[in-house]
Image (tube, rainbow, N blue to C red):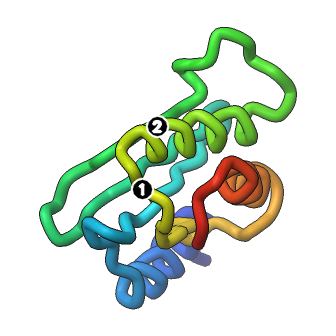
Amino acid sequence: MLSRNKLRLERHNRIRSKLKGTTVHPRVSVFVSLNHIYAQLIDDSQSKTIVSASDFELKDQKADVAKEVGKLLAERAKEKKITKVVFDRSGYKYHGKVKNLAESIRENGLRF
C-alpha cells in the first residue's frame, strides 16, 4: 500500500512536468508540514528563489497562518515588481491551508 506522501509526490511530479516558472511569471511553490507552511517564488529558468515566506517569520501565531504567509509573500513580490505568478500546489489538495494561502496571494495583488 502506498503512503500518502508517496502519492503526493507522484501528483507533484505530474504537476511539475507541466509548470515552469520564468523571470516574468515565477512559480509559487508551496510546502505544508504538520505544523508549518512555507511558500517561495522560484525562477526555474535560472534555478533561483526570488522571494520566500514562512510562518516562522510571523510574530503572532494566529489561527489562520496561511493567509498571513500569503500576504507576506505577495508584499515581498510587489517590492520586486512581480505581478503575475504560476501556482504550484506541490501535489497537495486545493483546500485548507493551501487554498487559504492561494486566496491570500490573490487578494494582495498577485495574479495567477
Rendered view: 27 above or below 98: below
Q: Position of residue 25 (x, y in %)?
A: 38, 70
Q: Residue under circle 2? A: 76
Badge 2 amino acid: Arg
Q: Position of residue 51 (x, y in %)?
A: 37, 42
Q: Quadrant of residue 72?
A: top right
Viewer-closest of 100 and 17: 100
Badge 1 amino acid: Ile
Question: Taking the image as drawn, is residue 39 in sight?
Answer: yes
Residue occupying the far left of the picture = 46
Rendered view: 108 above or below 27: above
Q: Quadrant of residue 75?
A: top right
Specify the quadrant that holds the N terminus: bottom right
Distance (Cα) linking label 2 and label 1: 9 Å
Q: Residue at x 23, y 68 (%)?
A: 44
Q: Residue at x 66, y 31 (%)?
A: 35
Whether residue 55 sits left or right of residue 26 in the image: it is right
What SS does tag 1 mark?
loop
Residue occupying the far top of the picture = 59
- The answer to which of marks 2 and 1 sits earlier in the sequence is 2
Instruction: Give me the disc on residue 44.
Output: none
Dot 1 surroundings within 10 Å: few (below 14), some, or many (20 or more)?
A: many
Q: Residue under circle 1? A: 82
Viewer-closest of 61 and 14: 61
Whether residue 98 sits left or right of residue 76 in the image: it is right
Rendered view: 61 above or below 6: above
Dot 2 surroundings within 10 Å: few (below 14), some, or many (20 or more)?
A: some
What SS does tag 2 mark?
helix
Q: Position of residue 83 (x, y in %)?
A: 49, 60
Q: Residue at x 49, y 67 (%)?
A: 84
Question: Taking the image as drawn, is residue 3 in sight?
Answer: no
Q: Residue at x 78, y 52 (%)?
A: 100
